[in-house]
Amino acid sequence: MINNVKSCPNFGSTRIPYKDVPVAKYLEPLNKYFEVKGFNLMKPQEAADKLDFGKAAAMMDKDAMIIVGKDGGPGGADTFIGRLLKKIDPDVKYIDDVKPVEIDGPVIDLNI
């Protein structure tokens, strides 16, 4: 659930409605941070599961381009992508449909 979009978005995939704007307008800023790969249309979680860290998926459906990062949640790639694309176009839609990545293993104590 989104409580306050401006301060704490928690999103999964980002949907960009088709307009007369070139797709490169959205992908160029992402290329500074992610290797963007084209995927066949699939569910956002399926695409996220196929990605490595540092990569994003771009998929097209009949109404929108869908951008997905590896992980959702407040500190995930999808939140970062959503914020970045929202600055470019306020009409982009965020959907919380990608789960955060769970890492099994010991906790690293950085308070030394």
Image (cartoon, rainbow, N blue to C red):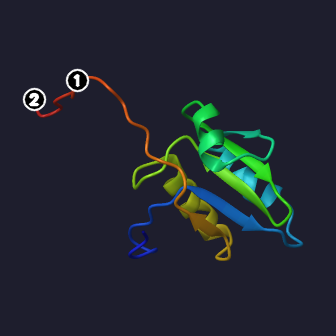
- Kindly give the residue lying farthest to the top in the view shown: 105
Looking at the rendered structure, the secondary structure element under dot 2 is loop
| Count of marks placed on residues | 2
Q: Amino acid at mark 2?
A: Ile
Q: Where is mark 1, residue-wise? A: 106
Q: Amino acid at mark 1?
A: Pro
Residue 112 numbered tag: 2
Among the 4 quarters of the image, the one containing residue 37: top right
Q: Give the distance between the C-alpha atoms of the residues marked 2 and 1, in whole angstroms.
A: 16 Å
Q: Nearer the viewer, residue 85 or 101?
A: 101
Give the residue at x 77% y 49%. 59
Quadrant occupied by the C terminus: top left
Is tag 2's residue or tag 1's residue first in the polypeptide sequence?
1
Among the 4 quarters of the image, the one containing residue 91: bottom right
Tell me: 78 left or right of 41.
Answer: left
Quadrant occupied by the N terminus: bottom left
31 w.r.t. 106: above or below:
below
Give the residue at x 64% y 49%. 44
